[in-house]
Amino acid sequence: MQNAEVLILGSGAAGLSLALRLAQQGHSVCVVSKAELSGGATLWAQGGISAVLDENDSLEAHVRDTLVAGAGLCDEKAVRFTVERGPACVRWLIEQGVGFTLDEDDPAAGRLHLTREGGHSHRRVVHAADATGRAVETTLASLAAAHPNIRVREHTIAVDLIVDRAARRVLGAYLLDLGTGRVDAVAAKAVALATGGANMVYLYSSNPHGASGDGIAMAWRAGCRVANMEFMQFHPTCLYHGKSRSFLITEALRGEGAVLRLPGGERFMPRFDARAELAPRDIVARAIDHEMKRLGLDFVYLDITHKPAEFTRRHFPSIHAHCLELGLDITKEPIPVVPAAHYTCGGVVTDLAARTDLDGLYAVGEAACTGLHGANRLASNSLLECLVFAEAAAEDLLRALPRRAMPGPLQPWDESRVTDSDEEVVVSHNWQELRRFMWDYVGIVRTDKRLQRAQNRVDLLRRETQEYYGNYRIGADLVELRNLIVVADLIIRSALARKESRGLHYTLDYPRTDAVTQPTLLPGRA
């Protein structure tokens, strides 16, 4: 009863769209979610999905914008593959019932309203007001929960993959039920990692608490390569407010005319880039970071007060309502904002069918490194990647599953030599220390000295945490801390290896960009 043909770890847009595509073709699927089924990072996504849906736009323009944002490190084949499949994936979402915002100038025509975000040369971002992720996630979660071929395990976290190392094949995974504390060995013909990014490795993040890099860490421990982990994207504009941490202020505000200002009212982005507020995220985030450090500021302002109040309320209802609850009327006063860790551009290396280095193991969404994002993700290409590579993985699995046998009995989880911990403070302390030194030493601007300090600290935390892991019964915090230490180490090692500044990786020791570059590849643990 525990087993399924395909075990999908993660329940965001990538995991749920993969599950539905397989289930609709008659295959049995088990979807594992850390929290409620619809509780992943997709739910938080505000901006939208980039796709060429306007006759004045072109696939070539979207490809070019993605390559420019990726700062010379994108895989052009992966970019074209993703961009070409984008429009059909948006239409698939509409068929599933996702209600996107229509063009207000002619709603009867049924044309989608398209907005523009930083780095895009055209309006090509389809959205559901300013809560696109919520519309996508709740629709897909509702369909998945009701589908007879999909079994859902909520409040469950994957601890590790179960692998036949000799055959280099994945057999299943160990799953920890957060309610009972029981660990089950679950077999599957194939496993898909849809676990999201690793942005909770930083003290300040726009992501939900569960973004702890679980899939990346598990795949690396199982022997898979990871790539480009130094490229951690910091969203330029998260709300700065004592009562509301991690609330993202979508880039679409800047797409609709919002400008960044210093406390005295001066607009500063034109000093840094000709595209001003519509420059790619790495440039905007570094500019804000520079001005905050130069002037000793805690935040800067994002100002949309020059637009009609009704326009702002209509286009950004969620942001307007949330800020109003905090006593801030964004139609009358600017929004205090700071950069925060937002997106993991690197991840588990995959091909265009979402296959990893292990037979039967797939990675989709933010956990994967497909080659699409390069050194910096273009705005709203994230949900696009989730949808396109979920479709690609489904196509490959539909061909492969009939030929694959279910693994035999798996080794049960062994906790015969562990005890209950009486020092949980070790986990909480190490969690906070890790996130603090990653923010201080491996943030928006780096140096080799800072990176080496971080490496020394992560080495110590790894030894302490591994000893703790080997002696005590596990819980969610320990599982996540163990994974965060792995991804922190991968980020630091990747950053130390890159002797140039490119995209999201900016180092004062090597400020120039090399003429020729390669992805940063780290082999999986043997």
Image (spheres, rainbow, N blue to C red):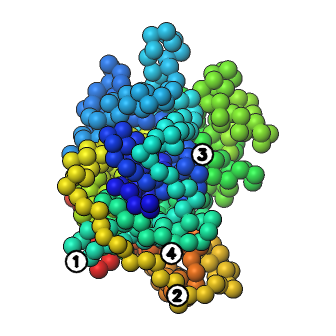
As drawn, is 364 to the left or to the right of 236? left
User: How far apart are the alpha carbons under marks 3 and 1?
Assistant: 45 Å
User: How far apart are the alpha carbons under marks 2 and 4?
Assistant: 20 Å
Residue 495 visible, this angle = no
Task: Compare marks 4 and 1 and give the one earlier in the sequence.
Answer: 1
Where is mark 3, residue-wise? 248
Q: Position of residue 379 (x, y in %)?
A: 44, 41
User: How far apart are the alpha carbons under marks 4 and 3?
Assistant: 27 Å
Crowd class of label 2 (few under 14; some 14 to 19; many from 20; radius 10 Å): few
Task: Compare marks 2 and 1 and give the one earlier in the sequence.
Answer: 1
Residue 416, numbered label: 2
Say which of marks 4 and 1 sits in front. Answer: 1
Vertical order, 468 against 198 (above or below)? below
Query: What's under tag 2, amino acid-wise?
Result: Ser
Where is mark 1, residue-wise? 166
Residue sitting at x 23%, y 58%: 404
Say which of marks 4 and 3 sits in front. Answer: 4
Residue 482, numbered label: 4
Query: What's under tag 1, amino acid-wise?
Result: Ala
User: How far apart are the alpha carbons under marks 4 and 1?
Assistant: 25 Å
Between 18 and 488, which is closer to the camera in this rendering? 18
Say which of marks 2 and 3 sits in front. Answer: 2
Q: Position of residue 146 (x, y in %)?
A: 51, 40
Q: Secondary structure at mark 4?
A: helix
Residue 321 visible, this angle = yes
Task: Compare marks 2 and 4 and give the one earlier in the sequence.
Answer: 2
Residue reaching furthest bottom? 417
User: How far apart are the alpha carbons under marks 2 and 1?
Assistant: 26 Å
Query: What's under tag 4, amino acid-wise?
Result: Arg
Q: Position of residue 392 (x, y in %)?
A: 28, 45
Crowd class of label 4 (few under 14; some 14 to 19; many from 20; radius 10 Å): many
